[in-house]
Image: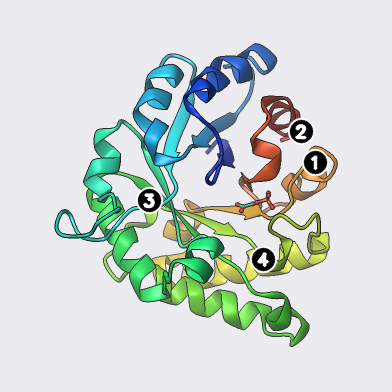
Amino acid sequence: MRTLIAANWKMHGDLSWIQKPSEFRALFPAGKDNIEILLCPPAHMLEAMVGASTGLDISVGAQNCHDESSGAYTGELSADMVAETGATYVILGHSERRAIFGDTDNWVAAKTSAAQKAGLRPIVCVGESRAEREAGQAEEVVGAQIDGSIPADARGDNIVIAYEPVWAIGTGLTPTIEDIATIHDHIRGCLTARFGVKGADKIQILYGGSVNPENAQEILALKDVAGALIGGAGLEMKSLAAIAALA
Ligand code: PGA
């Protein structure tokens, strides 16, 4: 399995950013490594980004989708609509979606199910708040999110988990290397309970939250960290390429 280096652009960028896949490949040529690069732009540029990434070995993903296939859901995109753009991934249950847009575990599970049925590979995000970490509840909270956000009908061979402590996102703060290892281990245990050892072994667990070229090497060297979900440092191809080079 290739190490997954994923950039979540959130609500940043304009159509000129479709140059970024070539810009990235000029800095970090394809085929020299065991790394998969994934760009997750805002929805309006998905299709153009897929076109601009063709032949560059760069995957494209959306940042959300709805669980229904169609209907009166103003402002939403279904998983099939995302798939129609040519995107192959979708980030689901990001903490910003959970905090600002009301995504619950149940809803993330429904979206995950819809995404898999549409042939997309969901990246399901989980992570504790600062208060939960300080109260010693990080494992419990993350375990409950894993149980609640992965639907009963989920396929283990087409899902990625991202551990993103809420307090580490966009703050420059990261957990200690030991704490990241502990939570990844706990997530692996939850996945094993659900999918069995063989099934769980196929599931990549990413770390996300203030990953940058200074800390990426140490984080990505951890045994059970199969890649990174990157916000701020993924907006510039120079820093994204620097992280990929350390992976
Ligand atoms: P950050 O964001 O790298 O800017 O902390 C990560 C994320 O939100 O996925």
Whether label 4 touches label 3, CB < 8 Å: no
Secondary structure found at label 4: loop
Vertical order, 31 against 234 (above or below)? above
Looking at the picture, which amino acid does disc 3 mark? Asp
Camera-near label (4 vs 2) is: 4
Mark 4 lies on residue = 165
Q: Mark 2 points at which residue?
A: 246
Residue 151 in the image, given as x and y percentages of width and height: 32, 69
Residue labelled with disc 1: 217
Residue beneath the point at 22% across and 45% down: 80
In the displayed structure, would residue 215 be above or below residue 88? below
Q: Which of marks 4 and 3 is nearer the N terminus?
A: 3
Q: Does residue 31 appear to the left or right of 105 in the view shown?
A: right
Marks 2 and 3, how far apart at CA: 26 Å
* Amino acid identity at mark 4: Pro
Say which amino acid is labelled 1.
Gln
Tag shown at residue 190: none
Q: Residue furthest left?
A: 71
- Residue 157 image label: 3
